[in-house]
Amino acid sequence: MSEVSLGSSVDWFLIKLSSAIDELEELSRSSKDSMRSYLKAFLGDERVKRCLARFSCYLEEVEHAIVSDPRFRSLRPYLNDIVEAIKSVPCIDRETTYIRNERLSHVHKYTVPRSLTDVLRSFIRPWFRTRKVTELVIEGTHRFEKLTADILYIVLALAVMLFILNTLSMLMG
């Protein structure tokens, strides 16, 4: 649920966009298609455009952050493409804020993308989470942790029983 609340900041958006562009660069290295063609396809996707619409009202803040913030250095070569894509969508202001979140700045889960679809999925997924889905994930995780703890207790009990039996057999034998 905390990721959803962070989803309204320009900073959060640029962190997600940096991760997506890193994955697109990796994808273009393993393919004959150019990075620009992947980026155009990515930014032209309707789902990405809906995400960009929230930040089209804050184009100056987005540009300033890309140019001045060292965390977004990887976005600088694609600044014109990003600005063009943001300008192409109408402004939908949903109380977007410019908050710098230091906690997320160093987090980067690295996976090699298999296709443009994988990159789109990883970029878009956090935007469309709902509270109900998040609660189900948390509840499912809790159940998994409880099951794991129960299994560990059983394994520990078996180890103690084997130790006792081994000690008794050594004393008797």
Image: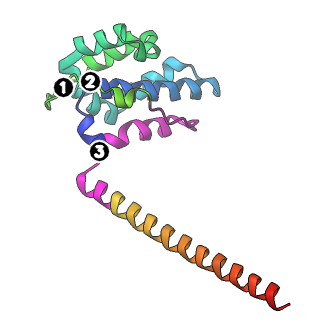
Q: Is residue 172 above or below residue 94?
A: below
Outermost residue toward the front? 171
| Residue type beneath disc 2 | Val
Magenta stretch?
107-136
Q: Residue furthest bottom?
A: 172
Q: Local crowd at mark 3 within 10 Å, few (<14), some, or many (≥20)?
A: few
Front residue of this view, candidates 119 and 90: 119
Residue at image point 36% right, 58% down: 137
Residue 18 horizontal/vertical position (percent): 43, 24
Mark-to-mark CA distance, 2 and 1: 6 Å
- Mark 1 or 3: in front is 1
Element class at badge 3: helix
Q: Are marks 1 and 3 in contact (CB under 8 Å)?
A: no
**Mark 2 → mark 3, Cα distance in angstroms:** 17 Å
Question: Is residue 131 shown left or right of residue 119?
Answer: left
Q: Which residue type does callout 1 highlight?
A: Thr
Q: Which residue is mark 1?
A: 97
Residue at left offset 30%, top offset 29%: 49
Report the residue at 49% width, 17% height from top. Answer: 36
Residue 74 located within the stretch drawn in magenta: no
Whether tag 2 and tag 1 are in contact, CB under 8 A, the answer is yes
Q: Amino acid at mark 3?
A: Phe
Would residue 76 appear left or right of 31 to someone viewing this image?
Answer: left
Residue 128's disc is 3
The residue carrying mark 2 is: 10
Residue 172 is at least partly visible in this image: yes
x, y percentage for residue 156? 60, 73
